[in-house]
Amino acid sequence: MDWRSLTQVKELGAAVYNCSCLAQDLGKIFEAYWALGVPEASIPAPWPDNFSTSFNAETPLELPLNGTAAAVYFSVGAG
């Protein structure tokens, strides 16, 4: 086993129920990491529309969360 590869393991846990918009955004993150995980991959310029989202810190998705108004978005970073 190459122990250096353990530094490249990323984990994410999320439970999303009855919110296809948020699930689609999470799917975009997964697809982007999948595309960038192949050998010799590079970050495309410009960033592809199929990986883009309209939900972010400036414009979060507004939805009820346990009966309370909430504003949410996913954020990831290189670790």
Image (cartoon, helix red, strand yellow):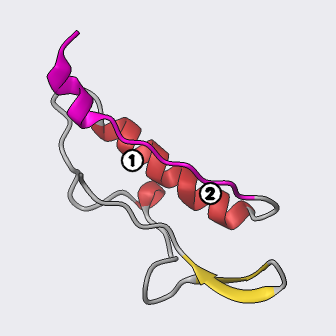
Q: Is residue 45 left or right of residue 26?
A: left
Residue 68 picture quarter: bottom right
User: Residue 47 location in percent, x, y?
Assistant: 30, 60
User: As rendered, which of 55 and 70 lies closer to the eye?
Assistant: 70
Numbered circle sitting on residue 75: none
User: Residue 58 location in percent, x, y?
Assistant: 43, 89
Secondary-structure class at tag 1: helix
Q: Which residues are magenta?
A: 1-16
Residue 27 belongs to the span the image colors magenta:
no
Q: Amino acid at mark 1?
A: Ala
Secondary-structure class at tag 2: helix
Q: Is residue 8 left or right of residue 72?
A: left
**Mark closest to the chain's N terminus, 2 or 1:** 2
Residue at 18% across, 43% down: 42
Residue 12 belongs to the span the image colors magenta:
yes
Compared with residue 71, is residue 32 higher up or lower down, i.e. above or below?
A: above
Residue position marked by numbered label 1 in the rendering: 32
> Distance between the Cα atoms at labels 2 and 1?
12 Å
Residue position marked by numbered label 2 in the rendering: 24
Q: Amino acid at mark 2?
A: Gln
